[in-house]
Image (tube, rainbow, N blue to C red):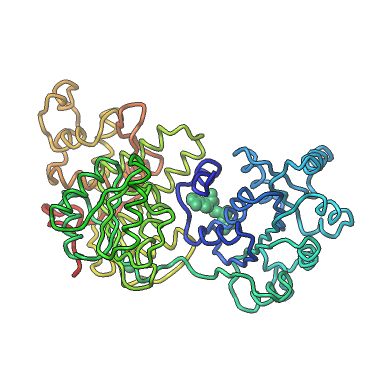
Amino acid sequence: MDTQGLLSSVFGFDGFRPGQEEIVEAVAAGRDVLAIMPTGGGKSLCFQLPALMRDGLTVVISPLIALMRDQVQGLQAAGVAAGALTSGNTEEENDAVFAALTAGELKLLYMAPERLASGGTLPLLRRSNVSLIAVDEAHCVSQWGHDFRPDYLRIGDLKRALGVPLAAFTATADEETQAEIVRRLFDGVQPESFLRGFDRPNIHLAFAVKDSPRRQILGFAAARKGQSGIVYCGTRAKTESLAKALSDAGHLALAYHGGMEPDRRREVERRFQQEDELIVVATVAFGMGIDKPDIRWVAHADLPKSVESYYQEIGRAGRDGAPAETLTLFGPDDIRFRRTQIDESLAPPERRAADHARLNALLGIADAQVCRRQTLLKFFGEETSPCGHCDLCDTPPELFDGTTAVRKALSAVLRCDQGFGAGHLIDVLMGKMTDKVRQWNHDQLSVFGIGKEYDKRQWNAIFRQMMGADLLRPDPERHGALYMTEPAMPILKGEAEVTLRKDTLAKSRKGPVAKA
Ligand code: ADP
Ligand code: ZN
C-alpha cells in the first residue's frame, strides 16, 4: 500500500501535518534523522508510518510507560503488530511479546531505555531483524537537561551494534541539546535534521464566505492571470464546470480528478509541472507527488475537510519561498456537508469525534476573530504573534456581542424540538408564514418572529458561526436537523456570552477581496 493509503487506512488521517511528510520520507528511506517538533505536532506518526513501510522490526525507545501503552494499544486496534517490553508488563504480556518476536511477526517493539541495561536485550534484538531504531524524547540523552536518563547513553551502542538507521525525536530545540543528541546518538555524524517550524510566512492566508463561488474564484484568478495555481473543489463535477468557466474567461485551465483515465491524469500532472501559466481545477486527488516549487496560488472553492487538509493543500503554494496567495471559500452548506460526511463514515465513534474536532479547528480558523496564522499555528502547537500577512491582519474584523442573537437562535432550535434545519429555523425567527410553518403550527411558538432585526443572509451567517463554534450540529439521523451541543447550554441560560464577526453579517457583499 502507498503512503497515503497507509496514512488513511491505518491511522485514519486524510493528510500529513506540517513537516510530517518530509520526515516520514527520510526515515522510510533509511536515513539517520533528527526531528524537532513541538509537543502535539504529531511525532509518533513519523516513526510509526515508516515502521510499516520498512521490512523488519522497528525498535522504539521511549521513557514514558503510559505513553508506550497508549501507542501500542492504538496500533493494535488498527491491526498493526506492535508490542512493548516495560517494567509494568505481566509475565504473560512479556511471553506474548517474545513469542511474536521469535515468530518474526512484530513490526514495532516499544521499550524503556532501562531495558537496554539488561544483558539479554541486545542478543534478542540481534535475532529480531531490526531495521530501524526510533528514539522518542531524544533530549533525555542530554546530561545538562532536566530529563536526563542515563540509559539513553546506551542507545548509541545499540545503533552501532545493530548497524541500522536511527530516527531521533524531541520537542527541545536549543542548540546545545541538539549537539549532544548528535554526539551521543549518531556518533557525531550529522543526521538529516528537521528543525523547521510550521510557519510558511510567504503564503498569504484568506477566507471568504461563499456567496457566488464561481464569481469569487474567477475574480481571484483574474487578479493572478498567467500564474500557475490550483483550485480545489469538493466534487468531480465541479472541477469540470469550473475549469470550463476559467477557460471561457481566458485562462489556461484543466480539470483533474480521480475519475479520469490514468493517462489523462498523468498528462495534466506533466503539463502542470512543466508549464508556467496553467491552472488545475482538482479534487484532493491532485497534489500528492506534485513537486512544483513555483505554484503562486491555491484557492478552495469548497471548504477542506480538516485543518490538516487545509494546511497541506495551501502548503503546495510558494515552495520556492516567493510570495503566494490563498483563498478558501466556505459557507453553511460546506459545514453541513463535511459534518454529514464524518457522521456517515464507517469509522469508529472516537475517530468520528476526532474528525469533528479537526473540522472544528478549521472552522475556528475560517471564522477567526484575530490573525488566521496565529490560530492555525496554535493548533499545531506553535505560539506566534500576529503575522501581518493574512486577511485579518490586513483588515481586522469588526466584532459585536452576539449573545442575544445566538440565544434567540438556540431558543428556536429548542422550541422546534431540534428537528429542523437552518432554513426553517430562520423562517420561524423572522416570522415568515410558510407552508412548513403552518403545517407544524410554528407560528404559535413564542420564538415566532423574534428575530426580525436580521435578514435571511445575516441569520445564515449567525447560524454558520454557531456551527463553526460547534454550538449547533446537524443530526445525521434526522436529515441534518440542527441540535444543540453541550457548550451551547450556558449561553442559552445566560451564563456565557458570544462574540460574533460583524463583517459576515454585512447586508450585501462584493465578491472576494482580490489583492492586486
Ligand atoms: P507528539 O508526540 O508530537 O506530541 P502525537 O504524535 O501524540 O504528538 O500527535 C498529537 C496528535 O496529533 C494526536 O492526537 C494524533 O492523533 C494527531 N495527529 C498526528 N498526525 C496527524 C495527522 N497527519 N492528521 C491528523 N491528526 C494527526
Ligand atoms: Zn495574520
Residue 495 seen:
no
In the figure, 261 relative to 245: above or below? above
Residue 283, position as x, y percentages in the image: 33, 47
Which residue is at 12% across, 57% downward?
510
Residue 152, position as x, y percentages in the image: 76, 65
Taking the image as shown, residue 280 lies to the left or right of residue 511, namely right
Residue 33, position as x, y percentages in the image: 62, 66
Q: Quadrant of residue 321?
A: bottom left
Taking the image as shown, residue 209 lies to the left or right of residue 335, namely left
Q: Quadrant of residue 166?
A: bottom right
Which quadrant is home to the C terminus?
A: bottom left
Residue 495, position as x, y percentages in the image: 36, 47
Which residue is at 76% across, 43% downward?
104
Q: Which is more toward the observer, 432 or 60?
A: 60
Residue most extreme to the right: 119
In the figure, 73 relative to 375: above or below? above
